[in-house]
Image: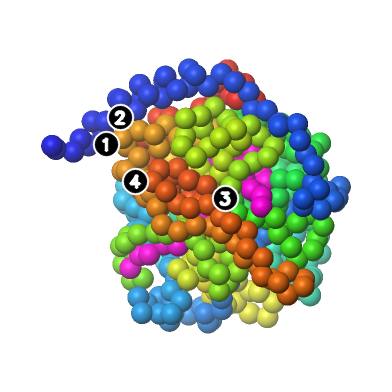
Amino acid sequence: MQRSTLSQRMPNVLILSTVMLSLLTGLFLFSGSQSASAAGHVSPNNTVSIHPQYLYQGKPQAGVTFSCQSNTAAVRCYGPEQIRKAYDIQPLLDKGITGKGRKIVIIDAFDAPTIREDLATFDALFGLNDPVLNIYYPDGKTPFDYNDENQVGWSGEITLDVQWAHAVAPDATIQLVLAKSNNDADILSATKFAVRQNLGDVISQSFGEGEKCVDPKLLKEEHQLFFEASLKGITLFASAGDQGSSQPTCDGSNNFFLSASSPATDPFVTSVGGTQLDADATTGAYKGEVVWNEPDFGVAGGGGYSTIYRTPLYQLGTKGIGKYRGGPDVSYNGAINGGVLAVWNADGTGQGVYIFGGTSAGSPQWAGITALGAQLANKRLGFLNPGFYILGHSPLAKQVFHDVTTGDNGYSYVDDNGKTVTIPGYKATKGWDAATGWGTPDVSKLLPALTKLTVTSSKDLTKFK
């Protein structure tokens, strides 16, 4: 039997979308339970965390190929050309769909003092144009301290987010919004600024913490803010986490507990999990993917189930999801062995080229993909989760997603007593799973379908609240 083309099958998907959207008339409900006893005391000054993983590769030099850019390297890496090929982004760029006229908002904390210079070097190294980069400090600029490990980690996160959102959507404006600290309240304040100033089409959040670690009042305020963002047609992404099925306990110890990550669990947010991409290191030709799980580095792709939010209606009927919201919704390459290259002045003394990994690499790249889609559709894409699930359940799923069916996101660590503790993870399966969601995108095929399945009207969005 001859396979039908994407365009031939779209009418059936649109009929399906109409039926499903007509059924999405319920509410997202808190479970009513916010006990943090298993995770430790919730502090009103609790913080979100980032865990960018990076390996130094050398100094940036034009025309230099780094040792990791080889199919025989012990630890491999990819530049923009290879990622664009692997995820089928390049055909859109070749047609002039480059994010032009669209704006990507990136929320981070503290600062990256050399971000403009590092971005310029990154662009020169990989042959990219320099974008418009606007930086906002809505609550004031915190003086940067290179002796503060937390601040240095955030500067690496900022570097990764900005450079790789730009690598995917090279002509989009980057709106970098920096909270004065990574305290929950400060991050929320920065996000409020971005939403209420209507700074962009899509927001990337490469950070998170265990749901039970968030103050319940702040969590509800955040949920309301995400609803407001969706009313404005702003798409929201967040990283699912880098400790597999677990999150750090709320007491600041070196322990972990079974938990999904907030804000990725919010039903208005698209949760981005992690895979390990296998592509040709030179051409970027796609070969396959498995669940991101690298015990040697102590990292794995986040995923699991909320204990706060009931199952949103777009997840009803999805195998593997019960009474509570499951995540991630989609995934992207997050491995260190197979990570992406970025230029970073880590200590203020000079630029280096680093391999970066983490689900924090996936969120900004999905934001870049959304900027491409917004240019393609000539409008904001808005709330995307219903569209992802419509496509995931449709015959188009095999064309628009790389379904990841190998691996799991179990996580092991050594506790303060020197004992190895293992938190069981979730296995990848056919279709949606709590390790990789629906999988990773074939962007050139996904966006023409996804742009027809957006939810932006206030009438429809009120049903979700």
Mark 2 and mark 1 in contact? Answer it, CB < 8 Å: yes
Return the mark for residue 444.
Answer: 4
Up-down relation of residue 339 to residue 224 (above or below): below
Whole-number angstrom distance, CA of label 1 to CA of label 4: 11 Å
Residue on which disc 2 sits: 10
Q: Residue at x 47, y 71 (%)?
A: 337
Up-down relation of residue 53 to residue 246 (above or below): below
Q: Which residues are magenta?
A: 258-280
- Tell me if 445 is positioned left or right of 57 in this view: left
- Tell me if 325 is positioned left or right of 68 in this view: right
Residue on which disc 3 sits: 303
**From where the camera sits, is residue 365 visible?**
no
Quadrant holding the C terminus: top right
**Mark found first going from the N terminus, 1 or 4:** 1
The amino acid at mark 2 is: Met
Whole-number angstrom distance, CA of label 4 to CA of label 2: 15 Å
Q: Residue at x 50, y 40 (%)?
A: 320
Return the mark for residue 6.
Answer: 1
* Magenta stretch contains residue 320: no
Whole-number angstrom distance, CA of label 3 to CA of label 4: 26 Å
